[in-house]
Amino acid sequence: MKKFFLPALATLLLAACGAGEPPCTDNSPACQARNEMSTSEGEGGICSLATQKRWVHGHLDNVYLWHNEINEVPETNYSTAPDYFKALLVSSKDRFSFSQPQAQFDSFFQEGVEIGYGFNYQGSGGHLYISYIDPDSPADFASIKRGAEILSIDAVPISKMTSKSLTAALQPTSTDQRYLFEIRDRGAEQSRSVTLTSRKVRKFPTQNVNTFSDTYGRTYGYMQFNAHTTRSEVELILNVLKFQKNQVQDVIVDMRYNRGGYLYIAAETAQMLSGPQTQGKVFEKLIYNDKHPEKTAAPSSTVLFPAMTRDQTYVLPQMNLPRVFLLTGPDTCSASEAIINGLTPFMQVILIGDKTCGKPYGFSQANQCGNAYFAIEFQGFNSLGKSDYANGIEPTCYATDDLQHDLGDPKEARLAAALHYAQTGTCGTARARQHSPALTTQNPPYLDQSWRNQRLLK
């Protein structure tokens, strides 16, 4: 077995930046169609609208978890294949299947790049607030910080803007789009105007990595974990090595904005947060629809806690602690929930914050004519056969997303609640676990980031 050497991480990072999706190689009809239909538009009529729609229906009928409940609608009612795909979905059960331009998706999850301004935002009651900033981005250079409120865009108050115009401004699809933002910084009385131009922004999978001690001398390791992307593998390993070096006694992983990503990253992260008691054990068992018992029975459908990185090059470091703290919220989704569910049979998992999004499902990427389609294909179960969180996972202690403090600040409400629990074993001023209603609300388009809600096979 090869040992883990820090100097080699630069090579691994460079490889992660350029990693591509492996080819589809099995002999199933869906796989053959996937490879055939990835042909560029215009070649032999393969990408005609009618052919795309037939492919969409056939793909869902083959792999969709609820294939026998597809919403049969006239395909002529829809002007694009993605619109037709959406109409066929079983909306009463499925909040997560989606399609997206392939280049945009690959850029984010494989290359760690997104077109935008570098601010991440949330909305409430007609207001928009900054959640966190990507380093070295237009928003960072404009000194925008967490907790700032966006008051208007191009002199139009947020409350007066249509959902369509907000989506266009906040989620640009090309570089060099310029907008004038009026913002009020956290704690400021006066607003200020900032012109931001969209560009390709590097997304940092982890941020604010730190170790610190409380007044009792207990040492903690904190990291903000934003996405299970290809690039995150190296950063997560480095962070755990830092925690080991500083001999932390508790690890706090802030996943409140982590909507998921690649399942293999979730398995690796869970292994590093645990120890020898999980190695080689079942992390997640994937169950496919009744058309594909061979997939459910395949060894690859039993995801184990790995001892090494995906490419079998480096040994994963392990914290080997009896418990882990995870900061959660409605944007903690899919692969992030897999970490919670997968670790629970083996160690104490303490959740601080709010209920997670509720996605025990996953899919594979199917590319066709420039679009990437993600139809829910499987449900994930832990080693105890549990997967009962379609309505979200309740936290151990409820605590607000405190926009008045920076992420990683021990005074920030969720981190403060985690520290209190670590010291006392109680929620303190935070509320204890309670039953919440089912998740049924649908975000408006400008707040919708559902394409990031991933439990994705690669």
Image (cartoon, grey):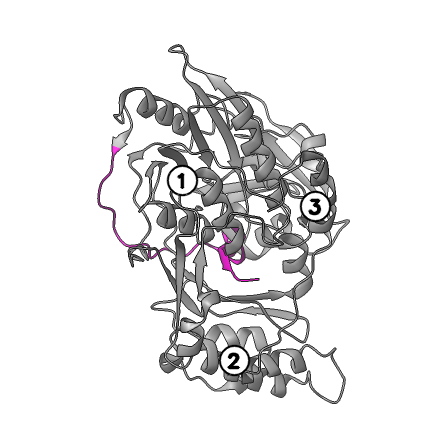
The one of 132 and 288 positioned closer to us in this rendering:
288
Could you say which is closer to the camera, residue 49 or residue 336?
336
Direction front: furthest residue: 1
Number of the front mark, 1 or 3: 3
Q: Which mark is first along the chain, 2 or 3?
A: 3
Q: Position of residue 65 (x, y in %)?
A: 40, 73
Q: Give the percent coordinates (x, y) of residue 258.
A: 49, 45
Of residues 198 and 51, the one drawn nearer to the viewer in this rendering: 51
Estimate the spatial distance between the alpha carbons at disc 3 and disc 2, rounded to whole Å. Answer: 35 Å
Image height of 277 relative to 194, above or below? below
Give the labeled residue for mark 3. 12
Disc 3 residue crowd, few under 14, some 14–19, many 20+, Cα 10 Å: some
Q: How far apart are marks 2 and 1 (CA)?
A: 34 Å
Q: Residue 59 carries which label?
A: 2
Under circle 3, the secondary element is: helix
Q: Which amino acid does label 1 sit on?
A: Thr
Query: What is the three-letter code of the residue carrying label 3?
Result: Leu
Position of 8 with respect to 94 (left or right) is right
Q: Main secondary structure of the magenta part?
A: loop
Q: In x, y percent, where is residue 323?
A: 36, 33
Q: Looking at the image, which is closer to me, 168 or 429? A: 429
Residue 434 point in image, percent of width and height: 22, 41
Q: What stretch is highlighted in magenta?
A: 432-458
Q: Mark 1 points at which residue?
A: 328
Give the residue type that dot 2 points to: His
Q: Quadrant of residue 125?
A: top left
Disc with the residue nearer the chain's start (1 vs 3): 3
At mark 1, the secondary structure is strand
- Tell me which numbered mark, 2 or 1, is placed earlier along the sequence: 2
User: Do the CB atoms of the residues marked 1 and 3 lie less than 8 Å apart?
Assistant: no
Question: Which residue is at a point 45% across and 44% down the rendered structure image?
Answer: 270
Q: How crowded is mark 1: few (under 14 residues within 10 Å), some or many (20 or more)?
A: many
